[in-house]
Amino acid sequence: MSVAAIIGGGVIGGGWAARFLLNGWDVRVFDPDPEAERKVGEVLDNARRSLPGLSDAAMPQEGRLSFHRSMADTVKGADWIQESVPERLDIKHKVLAELQGACDESAVIGSSTSGFKPSELQQGAVRPAQIMVCHPFNPVYLLPLIEVVTTPENDTGIVEKAKALLTSVGLYPLHLRKEIDAHVADRFLEAVWREALWLVKDGIATTEEIDNAIRYGFGIRWAQMGLFETYRVAGGEAGMKHFMAQFGPALKWPWTKLMDVPEFTDELVDLIAGQSDEQSGAHSIRELERIRDNNLVSMMRALKAQDYGAGALLNAHDAVLLQDSPVPATLEQITDYAVPLVMLAQAVPIDWLDYNGHMNEARYLEAFSRATDHFMKLIGCDADYIANGGSFFTAETHIRHLGEAAPGARIEVTTRVISGEGKKMHLWHEMTHEGAVLATGEQILLHVSLETRKPAPMPDAMQAILARMVAGQADMSPPDGLGRAIGAPR
Amino acid sequence: MSVAAIIGGGVIGGGWAARFLLNGWDVRVFDPDPEAERKVGEVLDNARRSLPGLSDAAMPQEGRLSFHRSMADTVKGADWIQESVPERLDIKHKVLAELQGACDESAVIGSSTSGFKPSELQQGAVRPAQIMVCHPFNPVYLLPLIEVVTTPENDTGIVEKAKALLTSVGLYPLHLRKEIDAHVADRFLEAVWREALWLVKDGIATTEEIDNAIRYGFGIRWAQMGLFETYRVAGGEAGMKHFMAQFGPALKWPWTKLMDVPEFTDELVDLIAGQSDEQSGAHSIRELERIRDNNLVSMMRALKAQDYGAGALLNAHDAVLLQDSPVPATLEQITDYAVPLVMLAQAVPIDWLDYNGHMNEARYLEAFSRATDHFMKLIGCDADYIANGGSFFTAETHIRHLGEAAPGARIEVTTRVISGEGKKMHLWHEMTHEGAVLATGEQILLHVSLETRKPAPMPDAMQAILARMVAGQADMSPPDGLGRAIGAPR
């Protein structure tokens, strides 16, 4: 069992704690604040309802969470130590020295600092080699970006170890090629923040109008392609050079006030805080956190379906999680046909809920459909097979709803083959949560040619696999409800 | 019928043309480029497959598109004139003068300029009052933001007219309080672009790494909440003032190179173009456009489900589109119960497709489920009713797939009540495309108390409505396939 030590339990430290804990690590927290346990608990509540459903695979079992009174106890034997204490170099140096007095030499010490370079953190350290910047983004339990910044003091071994551990908990380590003030992302945020302060101060737009200018325009563009790929598309067939030639001259124009810094007067603070109250004051911060997490999960899952941007990253991580899943990856992994086959194991995502506060009926079919997809893959109808023109189309489905599913609840779908020969395959799915049946899904599928879009016989090898499965289930009693007409009494 | 004149048919002009055309306007295009018709056609292809499915209502019938050889012909009698010619003030002045020689005084002349202020465009114009900046974002057919920038020369009447017309085609007019160089959004883009050029030039990160820093972190955050609301959440319960106090001092730190402008040498252009090729060169621009549009539609639809950001905007626009829909908004609008009731009319969105290139089975149920939701609303089970603790849960569904649906195809769902009394409602849905039945969906729903989560009788008034509907359909023959068990021969 891997152990993470979290030094500083605010929003950022709490986010790190949640990220590790929900990925199966044991997590120890040190924070002298008497409110730390409550604060970390609140972040964990948010993480537990949003993170598991981001994945199409079941996450590992949660690790153990503990709070400690001494830094030495917290870090002893830990594999990862994450420092998220206030942004003052003297405090950071004192904490790092205390950590290094008690921790393993092989542990990674990551700092969440946004303001300091790793060379500054390493000053005067007994083992500078193990200290590096690992700068996260809020909410740490959902957003994958971690800026990893190192110096020549960090040897390759520990840097590779750090990147591998971050990747293993679903993060994306962006290893900067050189250290620089504020790393990369915060330099952009700083530039936009400066410009935004001027726009509000000069009365060009309010905070709400500026937010709308971002989220109805370039913000949603950047969420999927970033800056350069977006401009590449804008440049059209003429290419990136042409685009740059067009945009280049604007650099000399007075399109920004960034050369100046607005003075940070009480008046400016009041103006912005007042506009922000007007814009967002109808919601408490807790509500806004939930709204933000719902939005992020929904958009990231939308990008998963397109296998792009953060969605492609999540899919790659799912592929790793699936290796420890009860869902067999290949036919050879199935040792016993005389039991229903687990074809799906995952948590109910936030975006599957409806106004009744439970999983929407269409998402039951989405889960059954994904179970069918995986079953098809096992019998040989995989992406290659489909690319070569064969597939299955669903002809009929009968769903019976027997229970409800809440967000974050772990569900499984098991599948039985009722029959499968010629052009037709008859499947029986059951969806369960902690052993209780939530729904049954009975499906008739037809093997088709994607060229004619018409039914066509399955290849012999596929029919043989299905025959073996049906024979293996011969001693099982037929599922309760099989072949029943809709509305028939139970 | 409203008429839009599009002056300049590049990517931006083509996007404007598509936006108006697909919202039912007649569109006339002027562009001396012999390739203009092909170029606008390509933008239209992209728009036709992505924009209609963004809406949960059916869009109006497309207007007529025509290409003209003279500017005077193009603008005569037009309600909206959009100028998207190259960014040179002398060209803009010449074009505007010619437009004003032929167009109606009451027409809005919007300029797509990103570089010029409206006061500059109005210089020397015969009627400065009708000229304003309406600055769009690419792709114009999907992104809602339009920066509207005016001067005191523009009287309130024409500004309000412009904002109303933009809103009517699903755009969000952000009316700046004062004119300023580069408006609002491009000032942010310019700031980020400058910083990005330095980061590449100084070898801190590649174009791909910078794009990842954006889209795995703050980009996806900004897509939904923008800058200020994101920081409000980050500030936590302590509030916006506290957040600003923390962030404020950083303004004085050297976190940006924005004060300098990197020199735009061939070397820098080659470096960036080369990195961009490595990052995105595997896809053609046409492919990247499709990928971008698929991503944008998927994310914007995800935000619709959360009713937030651009999603809330789209929902508000849908509510307007629904007024011209074949779907009755209230029970009183239904004049004839002896025909199936149209409960849904929309286009198949891109994110409803699967690997077989057609609408995924789960989305058929999503469409039936939305038809059921609307039917529930008509019989009195609306948001208020649900908030007061009553609702319907689906007990069983039987779907038969009889045809396929392609992206952008317009589908309708009609609904019949088979029975409805006590706790139970039995519905029959049919999904059609151009009159052909794509699928049938038979559902048994139970009226429930949301407190006990158990079945409970419907109120008498609701039962009376259902009885009236069932009686109204007494002379119709039962639907083909009603009550059939799954897999039963047709």
Image (cartoon, coloured by chain):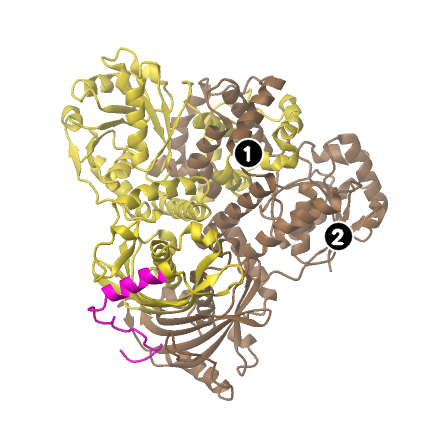
Chain colours: A yellow, B brown
Q: Residue B95: horizontal and vertical position, in percent?
A: 80, 38
As for residue A482 lying within the magenta part, the answer is yes
For the stretch drawn in magenta, what is the main secondary structure? loop
Chain where mark 2 sits: B
* Residue visible at 25% across and 32% down in the picture: A9
Residue A204 seen in this snapshot: no
Number of residues whose C-alpha sits closer than 10 Å to that of mark 1, classed few (under 14), some (14–19) or many (20 or more): some
Residue B130 in the image, given as x and y percentages of width and height: 76, 44
Looking at the image, residue B385 sits to the left or right of residue B160; the answer is left
Which quadrant of the figure contains the N terminus of chain A? top left
Residue B255, relative to residue A208: is it above or below?
Answer: above
Residue B228, relative to residue A322: is it above or below?
above
Magenta extent: A462-490
- Residue under numbered circle 1: B281
> Residue A258 vs residue A288: left or right?
right
- Real-space CA distance between mark 1 and mark 2, rounded to the nearest whole angstrom: 42 Å
Q: What's under tag 1, amino acid-wise?
A: Gly
Residue furthest front in the image:
A460
Q: Is residue B180 above or below residue B489?
A: above
The image position of residue A72, as x and y in percent, is: 15, 24
Considering depth in this image, is B471 or A206 the residue closer to the camera? B471
B473 or B462, which lies in front?
B473
Taking depth in this image into account, of B77 and A385 the one nearest to the observer is A385
Residue A33: quadrant of the picture: top left
What secondary structure is found at the residue carrying circle 2?
loop
Chain on which label 1 sits? B
Q: Is residue A255 left or right of residue A152?
A: right
Q: Closer to the N terminus: mark 1 or mark 2?
A: 2
Single out the residue that lies furthest toward the bottom.
Answer: B475
Q: Which residue is mark 2?
A: B79
Q: Amino acid at mark 2?
A: Asp
Camera sees residue A418? yes
